[in-house]
Amino acid sequence: MVTRAQHNWTPARTPGPRWRARVISATLALAGAFALGAATTPAAADISHAGCLWASAGYRQGGTIYAGGWAFTCGTDGFGGARWDRTSATGRQGSVYSPGAGNPVGQFSPGALQPGTDYNDYCVGNQLIEGPDDVYELFPVAGILLWHSAGPVSQWAFDSPVIRPARTWRSSSMCTDGVLS
């Protein structure tokens, strides 16, 4: 049997509360830094190379497409997210499909411009404002993508094979105090 005297063994001091707090604090800081670094590094890399969407088709950063008589270049917004930047009217025939302004989620990147459809109908008081009368630009608001009117539909060049959206099927009788039913 081995005794304490033979191994020159002395019991270790029990760590005090200050030492435990420092170890716990250092461990949490290291874990937080690792988690933050792991979470932000890939996302930043993906954003810098993210392309833009137009009618569900992906386009690379710096690429230019033509729709409605306008040129749109895939760029980034102030936060590094994909965004279409519209340049002056070109008069060129469209190079992409433009289905009209339906639900934009997973279909278009902010900055895209589309002719309106009945999807964009809304009411002002008891008056119906028909979506097909305007063109709409896509913009993000609080993490949600929304179409907003960017001007009259006469600004949009309807060229082959793009077909002008049909008139709305709704009427002002569907408007009650600004709510479309």
Image: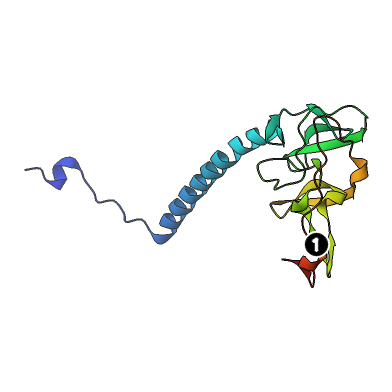
At horizontal 67% and vertical 46% (from top left) the residue drawn is 105
Which secondary structure lies at badge 1? Answer: loop
Query: Does residue 131 sit above or below 53 in this rendering?
Result: below
- On the question of residue 50 being in view, the answer is no
Q: Tell me if 129 is positioned left or right of 80 in this view.
A: right
Of residues 165 and 2, which is closer to you in this image? 165
Q: Tell me if 167 is positioned left or right of 17 in this view.
A: right
Number of numbered markers? 1
Of residues 48 and 112, which is closer to you in this image? 112
Residue 133 x, y percent position in the rendering? 87, 50
At horizontal 83% and vertical 37% (from top left) the residue drawn is 85
Identity, as a three-letter code, of the amino acid under mark 1: Ser
* Disc 1 target residue: 171
- State the quadrant of the N terminus: top left
Query: Does residue 89 sit above or below 105 in this rendering?
Result: above
Using a 10 Å C-alpha cutoff, classify the residue at mark 1 as few (fewer than 14 neighbours), some (14 to 19) or many (20 or more).
some
Q: Tell me if 87 is positioned left or right of 165 in this view.
A: right
Of residues 129 and 60, which is closer to you in this image? 129
